[in-house]
Image: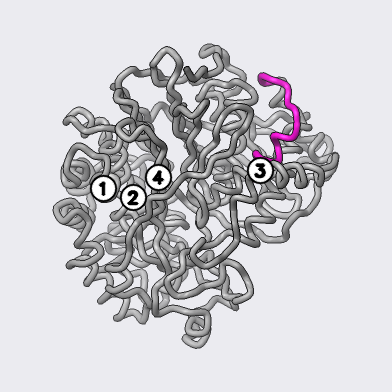
Amino acid sequence: MTTIPSFDPLAQHYSSHRFPIYANRAMVNCSTPQASSAGLQVLLKGGNAFDAAVAAAATLTVVEPTSNGIGSDAFCIAWSARENRLVGLNSSGSAPQAISIDRVIADGNDDHGHMPKLGWTPITVPGAPAAWASINKRFGRLSLADDLAPAVDYARNGYAVNANLARFWQLSANVYRAANNDGRFDEWFRVFTHNNLTPSAGDIITLPDHANTLQEIGETHARSFYEGDLARAIDAASRAAGGYLRYDDLAAFQPRWVEPMRLDYRGWQVCEIPPNGQGIVALMALNILRNFDFASGPAGRDNARTAHLQIEAVKLAFADAFDTVTDPDDTSFDYAQYLTPEYGEQRARLIGDTAQVRTTRTPSSSGTVYLCCADGEGNMVSYIQSNYMGFGSGIVVPGTGIALQNRGADFSLDPSRANALKPGKRTYHTIIPGFLMKDGQPVGPFGVMGAYMQPQGHVQVAMNAIDFGLDPQQALDAPRWRWDRSNTVRVETSFDESIARELARRGHDVTVSLEAADFGRGQMIMRLDRGALSSAFSESTEAVTLAHTIAGPSYVGGTESRTDSNIACW
């Protein structure tokens, strides 16, 4: 029998003062209460955790469009009680067949030799609708239309905007307004603003085009999006604007069921989706870190040595991943070598007492939604989807509400790079769902949102649970660090000042950020030995962005605010 290390559920080592939530039948854990409610609704109709995940994911395109949409990509790791195995789904779309490095440059659609972030050029085939249909077909109990019904209802009849959502909505509007000199984002403003204004906290929002599209996806089991009227609408909009995406690209798309990669870490198995996703980065870092000993409990976690080793391991992992991670169909590189003891030992020997620059690449920021679900049958789902940078490309297909992702922005226009743009190729992908197992049995799903913060968050949360024995809530609430570039590291306001100073003395350029979203929202569910489900989340409501350099006595702290629970239980 799998034994989950015991923890004190009343222990409050960190500042949030929230406790893990328990349930015995089912649990839906999302970044918004509406999405969790949608998942619970389908559970009460007789659905299972897979139905709940699809319902919640579709609802998030409505109630959190600042981070995802119908035009998103998606990934999933899940434990199927029926199949008694862990499965993975890669539903990331490829570049259009009509695009190439030479054509992008010849058409003048590059951004000073780089892929642009906005407009039609960085749009790849969206995978989210196909992910919903594939999960529903293989594992669901209800129809896809049933699973999508709560999302359709929210889109048609409205929901109230929260303060944080309103803030990020406004930030996106500012970006699109500044770049809309040619009118290419007019449909975005028609769909997502009223009289050219974004919603304020407490406003009731309806998205009728979105409702109609979701209903059509449900009724056609997503085929309309790839081979029907919705696909033709996307094709027509792309052709009219000089884009590269075509009907044939959509019709050819199929999600892929994959075997999750696993790393044995101190008797546990940490599981991630294999490349083209960056989950391998988290496993590479943990492979390095398992060569070091850490004291148990918060004392082992909250010291400069632990943070320094984690940061250096993550930097080494990213340095290798930036050079190799891409569509596995386009490379002969064997990513399994990153999980060998030899790789971890060799990289561990490179870590000394001071910070070192491992790569000069500067990762970008983005918005993402993550959710996890569990039911009384033993099914557990770890699911993530994203339009990449906020609403994505800024392109909304006229009359449909479909906001298209800008995932292709991560392609390189340098043909010598591993992640160079090619027709039909999938790009390096930032969104990653995580899953923990022990003794070959499922413990539970977890995830941390936020572009290149995600593998860094996975490392910290996994170690919090495994090495330091923290309960799910404390594992998520423990103050995080974030590596940005070179030796630059940001830390949360609640991060211990003395540890930050010692990291600075070791050569890390440390700043404290009042923007809690910089460190990734997150969710987690663990099944305990006693049979109950224990769940937790971290969610920022802080709307201030401010950083202070940590250098000697000038350190300035701050406060951050977190929301109440977004977890629906049964």
Marker disc for residue 285: 3
Give x and y (percent) for residue 146: 16, 42
Give x and y (percent) for residue 171: 46, 55
User: How busy is the neighbourhood of tag 2: few (under 14 within 10 Å), some, or many (20 plus)?
Assistant: many
Residue at the disc numbered 2: 199
Q: Select label 3 or label 2 by which is in front.
A: 3
Q: Are marks 4 and 2 in contact (CB under 8 Å)?
A: no
Residue at the disc numbered 4: 76
First in sequence: mark 3 vs mark 2: 2
- The span shown in magenta is 284-298
Marker disc for residue 205: 1
Q: Select label 1 or label 3 by which is in front.
A: 3
The Cα atoms of the two marked residues, 1 and 4, are separated by 29 Å
The Cα atoms of the two marked residues, 2 and 1, are separated by 8 Å
- Please give left or right for residue 28 compared with residue 512 in the image: left
Kind of residue indicated by mark 1: Ile
- Please give left or right for residue 370 compared with residue 49 in the image: right
Q: Are marks 2 and 1 in contact (CB under 8 Å)?
A: yes
The Cα atoms of the two marked residues, 3 and 2, are separated by 41 Å
User: How busy is the neighbourhood of tag 4: few (under 14 within 10 Å), some, or many (20 plus)?
Assistant: many
Kind of residue indicated by mark 3: Ala
The Cα atoms of the two marked residues, 3 and 4, are separated by 21 Å
Q: Would residue 115 be visible to someone looking at this image?
A: yes
User: How busy is the neighbourhood of tag 1: few (under 14 within 10 Å), some, or many (20 plus)?
Assistant: many
Q: Select label 1 or label 4 by which is in front.
A: 4
Marker disc for residue 164: none
